[in-house]
Amino acid sequence: MKRSIRLALGVVLALPPLARAQAIGPGFELERSGRYADAATIYFTTVRSDPTNLPALLGLERTLFVLNRMTELLPLVQNARARFPESPALRSLELRVYAALNQTDSLEAIALRWAASVPRSDAPYREWGLALADRRMWDEARRAYLTGRKTLGGEGTLAIELAELEQRAGNWEASAAEWARAVTQAADVGPNAASQLADAPAPMHEHVARILTGPDASVAARRVGAELLLAWGQPNEAWVVMEQTLGQGGGDSDTQVALRRFADLAGTLPTPEGHRVRGMALTRWADLVPSPVSERARAEAVHELLEGGDRAGARRVLEAHADATALGQASLLQILIADGQLDVAEARLETSKTALTADDRGALRLALAKARIARGELDRADAALGDDSSVAAIAQRGWIALYRGNLKDAMEAFRVAGPYAADRAAATERTAMMALLQRIQEESSPELGAALLTLARGDSVAGVAALRRAASRLPVQGGRLEVLLLAGQVAAQKGGEQEPTAVALFDEIVHAGGEGAAPPAAELEWARLLVRTGRSAEAIPHLEHLILTYPNSAFVPEARRVLERARGAIPKS
Amino acid sequence: MKRRDFVRTLGTYGLGGLLPSFTVPYRPLPSLLVPMDDAQTDHLKAYGLAYRAIQAGLKAEWLLNYRGGSFLIPDLDALRRDAALNGIWFEPVDSGIPAVRGEIEANNMDAVPLEKAPKVAVYAPPNAAPWDDAVTMALQYAGIPFTKIWDAEVMNGGLRDFDWLHLHHEDFTGQYSKFFLIYSGMTWLGEMVQRNSDMARRLGFQTVPDLKKAVARGIHGYVENGGFLFAMCTATETIDLALAAEHVDIAATFADGTPIDPDADAKLDWSRSFAFTNAHVEPNPLVASFSDIDGHQVNGGARRQPLGAFTLFNFSAKIDPVPTMLVQNHRQVIPDFYGLTTSFTRNRLKPGVTILAEEEGAPWVKYIHGDLGKGTWTFFGGHDPEDPQHQIGDPPTDLSLHPHSSGYRLILNNVLFPAAKKRELKT
């Protein structure tokens, strides 16, 4: 025996009982460093002088298991239990030792003897089952739990234990049924149930959901089912289930908590359906909570419904609350604009001036101007902007000038607006347009303006044709290729029947070649189109041609990445 | 090319074989220098360019310690095109070659001819995710072809078709990386267990640990007969444990139905292993650690050690070209990265093992090399040099975002090293 262990044992023996219990520290350290046999020696010594020392007995359980010497522990545990029979921890340990020794008959006898001594407790059955489950003896563990349920009565008895057992055994339907019993008995285990069952493999989702949401399922079980459907990316189905539980649950605190939790979970889904369902849940939740929480919830609900594309739903929420706040009024105006009721919106905007913040007013005027442009009403769009001198309004006036064919004024307005007006996408779009315009020498091009307006109005097929016509009036190196590139990009984005048009346009630009960014950009777009449509092998020569022909082009790094993906040399990201 | 072939050529190639003959007027051929210092725009793809040059039957040279371990390849349109497409920086040199060679001759540098593209095998299960192995990713990114093999190919003698074999995170103790209990119920684990069990049955083994021990012996024999072995992560530690435990049960009950031999440590025969000796086997089936060979113990609870950085050794290029090749890099100090086996405890290394990289002052080393019979082996700890904390389920590493990765360069040094014409070591 090493000197250090002898020293540690000496210290253990020399200490009074309380300190002795603490003196197994060296055993822990030895155990942590992987010296299990040495650690066991320390624990044995402690138990010899203090037979019911639980930490030392548990230390022996850990170390002797690893050393395959569990038989040495049994007499010590039996002795400890005889001295302190009311200790559940010692009883549990005894059961685990029998399980580790694979003595299942003795294990059962010991468990039933313990159960007889505490006839109203489920602990003996729980520990009996757990000891077997830890040995992966699923059938025996199930029998132990069910024995407890039968003896003690109550459908939800040991339901959590059975649910976890069935899950570990891979019986997801049985696990769901047990969780349903568990949440029916105690609704607060719902989150745990949903979290556990969310791990069910995809083929089992339907089966699990059916058990939890069936007609016989309790409200609590159905709410777990609704959460699971959300977790599995089925928000609409989840809301149907959740909504059915609301009438029965009334406005009790469980319903409030469940609705809020459901709304929060829906918030993790980035899809429009997720937003819409979150909006509906928040709307219902707002009806259950007091002011001012309810107003905030309603405003959030409207926002979510709009994000989810449910303008009618958002409008219903707003109209149902006549005392809408400024936020509500702004939302309502947004909905009117989005619904195309521009005259109504314009009139309300005029009368609600004082009720709206300056930021809201500016945003609504911009939205109104864009909606007018989408109708081709350029004069009314200009009027909607009024005397707004913000950079966003100046940028918008640039677009209006461009659609009128006034390239010079458009360029000037974009330049004045700078690169930060509105959001990043708008700034990028504006910068790309400036890059195109600077290749064109003419100050005016009504054909190009009309073509771009057609695009802005959402008619991409006619827009592509109009762009081609406008391009034909421009010199090859004076903007024609750039306008054709834009037409090609629009056609490629449209896809389907427009793909041949896109390819023809890219081909025309690449063959024209020359200075400027259009030829390499067209070749990159062409390759991307091919990769997107599963023709990576055809894309590779284009990308190689681009890299070798335009080695100094800014498109080369991106072309290399697309080439790597086309070759399968890097993962898709 | 296998090591035995190198040895056979010793008589005809010495250092002088690399230099122009004094009796024939020297006229340098136009060449491209592919620098591997900070001028290089894609270090990893540069290895692919060198590989493809020799694959095409062209002569290439590896200029050890010259500008980060540069390559010299013929100045041909096809190679220029290859470099341009892959974003590899090169510098045409013709009249400048004598100056380059003069600098190499006068310093701790050397020029090693690369003569035959090695045939590369990667040991991985048939359905292994293509992005879950650093070497596979490096090979794919650099454009170096390889063949995937697994247990059946090893057991049927398929290794003889390859010059170089890579092992990644296989657990040769047959314990499924000891994830069996920790990840119980996970689909991927179930598939792994099923696949390995099926293979064991198919090849006539009672248990997966028995199969893996036999595979480890097959790989050991491959190296003894002249193969080049490169292993990373768990494969390093577990292949040695499997070899040392040929007649000892070191697998937990869940893997083979019987508990670990309580006297396993004493019964292990380390004379059979590649690199390690006198290790203590981790007996706890719930701890995803195999032994005390690994210094970092990433899953060892309180035993887990934090990551530092490792330093590459500087070898004499003219005297020790092999270790010099293996440490060619544009960085000498590289951030460490975890794996199920991250590093190798110094006092578990066999005498004679060459340490290629270590963490200074730490009780572990990172990168080691040695000879066995007619072949060589190289072990590199850790899972993915560009994903230091790699976790199961992490997104794959996109090497186009790490074209200058020093850690991945070490992997590719190993791939190219068998292509080098062997010269007799002077030490």
Image (cartoon, grey):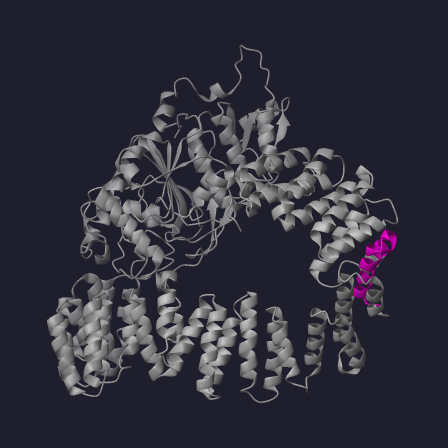
Region in magenta: A389-412
Question: In the depicted view, which residue is nearer to us: A49 or A349?
Answer: A349
Residue B179 drawn at (x, y percent): 32, 58
Residue B279 to residue B313: above or below: below
Q: Is residue A396 magenta?
A: yes
Q: Quadrant of the C terminus of chain B?
A: top left
Quarter of the rendering containing residue A136: bottom left
Q: Residue furthest top?
A: B23
- B389 to the left or right of A21: right
Residue at x-position 14% and y-position 75%: A108
Residue A246 drawn at (x, y percent): 47, 83
- A264 to the left or right of A467: left
Residue B164 drawn at (x, y percent): 38, 34
Q: Is residue B236 magenta?
A: no
Question: In the depicted view, which residue is nearer to us: A247 or B22?
Answer: A247
Residue A2 to residue B408: above or below: below
Residue at x-position 14% and y-position 74%: A107
Residue at x-position 25% and y-position 39%: B217
Question: In the depicted view, which residue is nearer to us: A536 or A125?
Answer: A536
Residue at x-position 47% and y-position 74%: A240
Residue B289 drawn at (x, y percent): 32, 56
